[in-house]
Image (cartoon, rainbow, N blue to C red):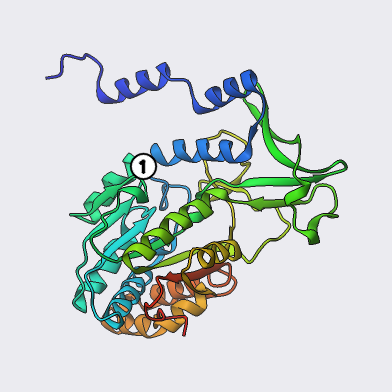
Amino acid sequence: MSENPLDAGQQERATNAAEPLLAERLSRAITMAGPIPLSQFMGAANAHYYATRDPLGARGDFTTAPEVSQMFGELIGLWVADLWHRAEQPPVRYVELGPGRGTLAADALRAMAKVGLTPPVDLVETSPTLRAVQAERVPGAEFHLDLIGLPDDAPLVFVANEFFDALPIRQLIATQEGWRERLVACQDTLFLPIAGDRSFDMIIPRDFKEAAPGSILETSPASVAVLRQLAKRLNDQGGAALVIDYGYMGPAIGDTLQAVKGHAYANPFDEPGEADLTAHVDFATLAEAAHAEGLVVYGPVTQGEFLTRLGITERTASLSLATPERAGQLATDRERLTHPEQMGELFKVIAFTAPGWPVPAGFE
């Protein structure tokens, strides 16, 4: 018996009561030092959010493609296996960035094993809560907080599904005085975006210099930094990366910052750390950064086109034949993943390979 008279739930409540809420900590910091960049606000909010909960599924805040259907992860696994086979079957490691509940990895590894590929698995995850779930789904996986700790003994095949959208962004806003960075101010614990004083006119693309006041241009230095680290690994060790996310080909004017809570949109500035903050991924910037680092770039293509090329129609038919009672649900899941009005058009897929590696499936 524990000597502590508090049960686990009471201990947790006592701990939470002793620690200021994230909103209170951010409010205090802003009050003392002034408004902070949106990237800092978003980074702090998401770090707290992912560290304190499992956000996926019906009881969470959102659902990702691997949670929609096993077919998604299975096709990704066959994509990895096909690339490995055409690269003459070198020893490789499977690396997933932000692996959620481990569902994609589990489904992908099962499909790989059926064609003879059983790679070591490395999961890059900062959330203790999600790590615990992933360890159950993917026994034997090694965990890392970032790319620095990854082994250097073999080529790496990276998979990043809905990873880049959660990385912090900076927003620049056009004002009557010129382009300024969007900062976050607060009054008590009411947070709101404001325009800063510093001019950013010198870095604005020519086409946008005369944009109407209120126009917003987004950048994600954090995404470029991750891409450069990934590129160094691929150049040094060989391999490939597959990135799947919702996004656009930029640069472009538009405010894509959004918050999701309970499967509904919320105000991104309300209750920091209690909702998932994301922004659309600029695939053109990722491609440009990859090119600059010497990688070979394929795509982007739409998720619907990619999954169709990999054989999701045939896989749906095969599963329906084996389990007729699931045929209707399988067809619905396929439509959700591929239809232009659902996930098929907004979600894009891009691949990067080290020089000399085969052209990945889905991009021929």
Q: x, y (%) of residue 225? A: 50, 51
Q: x, y (%) of residue 236? A: 34, 62
Q: Nearer the viewer, residue 127 or 107?
A: 127
Residue at 53% x, 68% y is: 291
Residue at 28% x, 76% y is: 84
Residue 273 appears in view? no
Q: Nearer the viewer, residue 355 or 125?
A: 355
- 166 to the left or right of 13: right
Question: In the displayed structure, would residue 157 be above or below residue 57?
Answer: below
* Location of mark 1 (residue): 127
Question: In the displayed structure, would residue 150 be above or below residue 322?
Answer: above
Residue at 50% x, 46% y is: 262
Q: x, y (%) of residue 336? A: 49, 70
- 86 to the left or right of 34: left
Q: Amino acid at mark 1?
A: Ser
Regarding mark 1 in the picture, which secondary structure is present there? loop
The quarter of the displayed image where residue 64 is located? bottom left
Image quadrant occupied by the N terminus: top left
Q: x, y (%) of residue 96? A: 35, 58
- Within 10 Å of the Cα at label 1, are there few (<14), some (14-19), or many (20+) other Cα atoms? some
